[in-house]
Amino acid sequence: MSTVSRAGDRIESVPFLTRDDASLLLVLPGLFVFSAFMLFPVLYLLGISFTNAEPANLFAGEGVVAVLTFGDALFVGLENYADVLTDGQFWNSFGVTWLFVATSVTLKIGASLAIALIVTSDLVRGKRVLRSLIIFPMGLPPIFTITVWRGIFSSAEFGLMNQLLTAFGASSVAWLSGRWTAFVAYNVTEAWLAYPFMVIITVSALQDVPEELHEAAVVDGAGFLARFAHITLPSIKRPVLFASILTSAASFQQFLIPFVFNQGGPARANELIVVYGYREALSFQQYGRGAAISIIALVFIGAFMWLNVKKGKLADGVND
């Protein structure tokens, strides 16, 4: 008798289990990990959002149990949510965040399409070397890459961007001191962080486009732009949409770029929603308010992901 059969017999000996339930038991370790590292933090955050938690009362008790039960924090109902939703800074952060998502994703799609078309072109040699160089940034820690880009966009004259401007006869720019120049720097850095993933997905999609379609279009006299618009784009739109949704979620949660560059400045003008929640919770020590901001952000990003998957009909796969 095999090990699997013996395991099945033992499961059948349990009153409330059948042999068909054996496969479900394999899910339990993953379910435990999900509950411990994903579900529990969200539920704890939700609980804190209904209290006036701050360091003085959250850690007032002794031991882990006291912290898990919110210490001496008092239940305040929806007060934190009301305060957040009536705060002008929240709506500024909310609007800037969605603008950042829209502009950065557009930049990522454009850059990844251009690079993918180049590395899949028959006119380009050394494609393997190019692809290796393209995915190289994925191996670097994000904090390292962001710090390097902060130096590139340094407001000082030795910053690489300012050196390029000076070389072309333009004056230097205080990149991180202006609202929209800093916003441009955010977008370029975010695109650099995400483009390797986008290129990998796009290249894979391009390689799946039947060559016969291009050959037939060439015979009919279609040029590159016509073939790109009527053959390439329709063939790769679902994989690219899938990658765009994932990178949109990453952009929505972006914290390191604005925080390392200028902490969402100038004067909190570019404070993305995650930075706003962090500042309220840790800088101002309003844990309940910070938790409410995080829950609101979680609801919006969850709804955004669900709508995109639903409208994009991606639930059945990207190639259907």
Image (cartoon, rainbow, N blue to C red):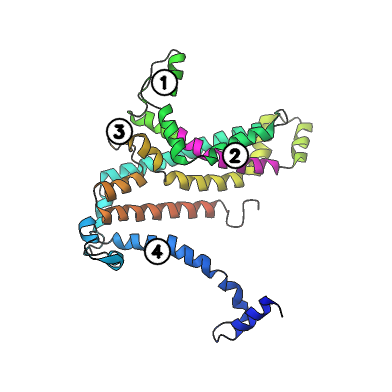
Determine the residue located farthest toward the top in the rendered image: 169
As rendered, which of 248 and 274 lies closer to the eye?
274
Q: CA distance from mark 1 to mark 3?
A: 19 Å
Q: CA distance from mark 2 to mark 1?
A: 28 Å
Q: Say if the magenta span includes residue 124.
A: no
Q: Earlier in the sequence, mark 4 or mark 1?
A: 4
Which stretch is magenta? 188-209
What's the mark number on residue 40?
Answer: 4
Residue 210, percent from left and from top: 74, 42
Instruction: Categorize mark 2 by other alpha carbons within 10 Å: few (<14), some (14-19), many (20+).
Output: many
Q: Secondary structure at mark 3?
A: loop
Q: Say if the magenta span includes residue 198.
A: yes
Q: Nearer the viewer, mark 1 or mark 3?
A: 1
Q: Earlier in the sequence, mark 3 or mark 4?
A: 4
Residue 20's image quarter?
Answer: bottom right
Q: Which residue is mark 2?
A: 199
Residue visible at 61% across and 46% down in the picture: 239
Q: CA distance from mark 2 to mark 3?
A: 33 Å
Q: Nearer the viewer, mark 2 or mark 1?
A: 1
Q: Secondary structure at mark 4?
A: helix
Label 1 sits on what residue type? Answer: Asn
Residue 140, percent from left and from top: 51, 39
Q: CA distance from mark 3 to mark 4?
A: 36 Å
Label 4 sits on what residue type? Answer: Phe
Residue 171's image quarter?
Answer: top left
Residue visible at 52% across and 65% down in the picture: 30
Label 2 sits on what residue type? Answer: Val
As rendered, which of 74 and 210 lies closer to the eye?
74
Residue visible at 56% across and 51% down in the picture: 312
Q: Which residue is mark 1?
A: 162
Q: Which residue is mark 3?
A: 266
